[in-house]
Image (cartoon, rainbow, N blue to C red):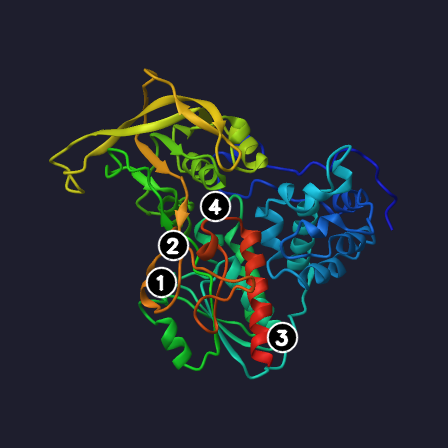
Amino acid sequence: MAKANMSLTRNVMPTQDASVRAHNFDEVALGYSEEQAIDEAARCLNCKNMPCVDGCPVKIHIPEFISKIKEGDFEGAYQIINRSSSLPAVCGRVCPQETQCESKCVRGIKGESVGIGRLERFVADWHNTFASDAPVRPESNGHRVAVVGSGPSGLTCAGDLAKKGYEVTVFEALHTAGGVLVYGIPEFRLPKKIVAKEVDTLVALGVEIQTNVVIGKTLTVDELFEMGYEAVFIGSGAGLPNFMGILGEGLNGVYSANEFLTRSNLMKSYLSDSDTPIMKGGKVAVVGGGNVAMDAARTALRLGAEKVYIVYRRSMDELPARREEVEHAEEEGIEFRLLCNPTEIVGYHNPDDLRDPKNGFVTGMKCVRMELGEPDAKGRRRPVEIPNSEFEIEVDTVIMSIGTSPNPLIKSTTEGLEVNSRGGIIVNEDGLTSRRAVYAGGDAVTGAATVISAMGAGKVAAKAIDVALSK
């Protein structure tokens, strides 16, 4: 057992040098060594009331797995995490631990909290590298469940049910399983092989994955029941991009962040020999301040942009992205144009260009300067336009990253499925929709949110499905 470590600061996460990583898609964070992991684990006080667990949406037994790390029992630590989470290698990389489990850590009162997320990543990576035993597939209980979408909520629901012996089929619209984990998060933050490994673990448990199946087109929810499935979980995400409605959004060179990242990820534009038609070079403006905006900006940089701007209408203090992602973006040379709001995307028209001459091509973006006024309904100070403050940024590409909404396809093809004014599926506390035996969770319910909150919703629904079908 490692000696207690009372350092007020956590072990630093090794990373690629910023000047190098800005030009490649290799993972930025390199992970703890065994020595670093044990030393960081020794900072945990093993609190009896476990406040960190209360901050975890999937209720991982955090002090218990950290104690195993202190002992050097890394596989034991993995098995403890695996009882609660089907995607530990993913969560260790992209979960916002600083606002969840780590925000409750007692060590954070007079210093930095324990690096819980970094330790989770270490344990999962160790298991994936060294463990050779395949998961034991439970005996079938004879019940069949369909899961729509292979993102974090769908995979979590599928994994929890498979562990209980359910025959689960996951239907994915795209050709690669993983949902937003593979098409929405860039390679340098979450390598595709990590997601594939997690999916393979679920397949070994008995989960069937069917890709290229669009529920609402290829099959309907009603047809799934006709095929013998006794319950359906909808975890189809929020893939419908939002736009500002300003002049010029139809110009060539304007992307939604959803489209931009999907092209980069699923069409492999991050590979040096890729011929995917996506921007190379030029100046790029990314509108928005969340994690997706950081991902889009840093991806554009790696795809050869000369200059990348983050354009956000509030200040750095209100920026919703994770601090780590913002710091990485700044280190890589991305420029933050804060307290700015776009008013028009401008361009030129080239009638000789056969792509779409009537729309033209981006040459710049007009903006106005903002100042912060009174707090809005969420407590954030409302941005107010400063009169006569117009200016223009010279850019060739504009990426809109101002949120997404649930795709209306499933609602429009499923009779009796109630949604709210934002298009989110309405559910009760168990994830049950207005349709009998139809459950939903994740972004399809809440709109764009975090991976771990989607996983939490998948767990809640899986528990409710098990209770319902076990009667």
The number of numbered discs placed on residues in the rendered structure image is: 4
Query: Which residue carries the number 3 mark?
Result: 164
Q: Which mark is residue 423?
A: 2
Q: Quadrant of residue 423?
A: bottom left
Front-most of residues 359 and 351: 359
The crowd level at tag 1 (other Cα within 10 Å; few <14, some 14-19, many 20+) is: some
Q: What kind of element bears circle 1?
A: helix
Q: Nearer the viewer, mark 1 or mark 4?
A: 1
In this rendering, does residue 19 appear at all?
A: no
**Real-space Cα separation, disc 3 to disc 4, in angstroms:** 33 Å
Residue at the bottom extreme?
142
* Of callouts 3 and 1, the N-terminal one: 3
Q: Position of residue 321 (x, y in %)?
A: 52, 37
Q: What kind of element bears circle 3?
A: loop
* Of callouts 2 and 1, the N-terminal one: 1
The crowd level at tag 2 (other Cα within 10 Å; few <14, some 14-19, many 20+) is: some
Q: Nearer the viewer, mark 3 or mark 4?
A: 3
Task: Answer left or right for 282 relative to 337.
Answer: left
> Which amino acid, by three-letter code, is at mark 2?
Gly
* Of callouts 4 and 2, the N-terminal one: 4
* Of callouts 3 and 2, the N-terminal one: 3
Q: Position of residue 301 (x, y in %)?
A: 43, 34
**Real-space Cα separation, disc 3 to disc 1, in angstroms:** 29 Å
Look at 23% across and 37% down and name the residue there: 251
